[in-house]
Amino acid sequence: MSKAKSVDPRAKYKRVVLKLSGEVLRGGKSGDPIDAATLEKICTQVKEIHALGVQVCVIIGGGNIFRGLNGVQRGVDRTTGDYMGMLATVINGLALMDCLEKLGVNTRVQSAIPMNQIAEPFILRRAVRHLEKGRVVIFVAGTGNPYFSTDTTAALRASEMHADIIMKATKVDGVYDKDPKKHADAVRYDHLTFTDALKQRLTVMDSTAFSLCMDNNVPILVFDLGDEHAIRKAIMGEKIGTLVHN
């Protein structure tokens, strides 16, 4: 039976929602939607913080396989496209589960869309109990509704689970005042308030997700997943990425 460890006293956060974009799973040279080496690197980072006794929820997007908004551009109905995107997150979630289990991390997948043969239904109390027993919980299929992104799912689940923070792992090392790819003089913020981010129209999350985080006082840490110990550094409160908070 799974048994939770006591949390390392050095850890700044005890319960976290780790938000991953589907794109982070895409392979470099291979170009595969789910690159085995990349997947293992990410799961190794999750294992590293799990070993500290931190309670970890993971939410992953499906953009490496199918993105609903891109489907609209190809003539797919928006609602249909969004459901296709939700199913893509299930594929990614199962890949994460399989890899984590092989690394010795007890994991459960909960889906917002019923699919009992491959995932549990999302039940809040059951999810909390899994965390208390030391299991990593992966939430898939978004909120179960079209027109809502996985950013919004992260904000919703973090609010429901009373998570200490949303850790948004991306390919960018934080939030900038302008696009760093286009402007060499772009400045990265260490800290930002929700109000300042809104005033400056900085894209941290989509507006629905951002509003949920602001209303429920859930801080967001945006950081680069490229560093192989990035998540651990964030958990330990080291200076990494941009923290958006009240």
Image (spheres, rainbow, N blue to C red):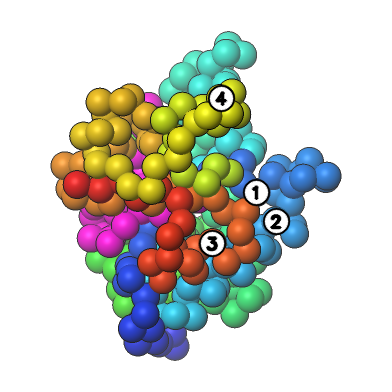
Could you tell me which secondary element the residue under label 1 belongs to? helix
Q: Earlier in the sequence, mark 4 or mark 1?
A: 1
Q: CA distance from mark 3 to mark 4?
A: 25 Å
Dot 1, crowdedness within 10 Å: few (<14), some or many (≥20)?
A: many
Callout 4: 10 Å neighbours few (<14), some, many (20+)? few
Q: Amino acid at mark 4?
A: His
Distance between the alpha carbons at the discs numbered 2 and 4: 29 Å
The residues bearing labels 4 and 1 have C-alpha atoms spaced at a distance of 27 Å
What residue range appears in magenta?
Answer: 146-170
How many labels, in total? 4
> Residue 230's spot in the image, x, y percent?
54, 61
User: What secondary structure is marked by label 2?
Assistant: helix
Amino acid at pointer 3: Ala
Query: Which residue matches tag 4?
Result: 183
In the image, 119: left or right of 112? right
Can you identify the residue that label 1 sits on?
Answer: 25
Please report whichever mark, 3 or 4, sits nearer to the chain's N-terminal start. Answer: 4
Numbered label attached to residue 230: 3
What amino acid type should be assigned to the residue bearing mark 1? Leu
Callout 3: SS: helix
Q: CA distance from mark 2 to mark 3?
A: 14 Å
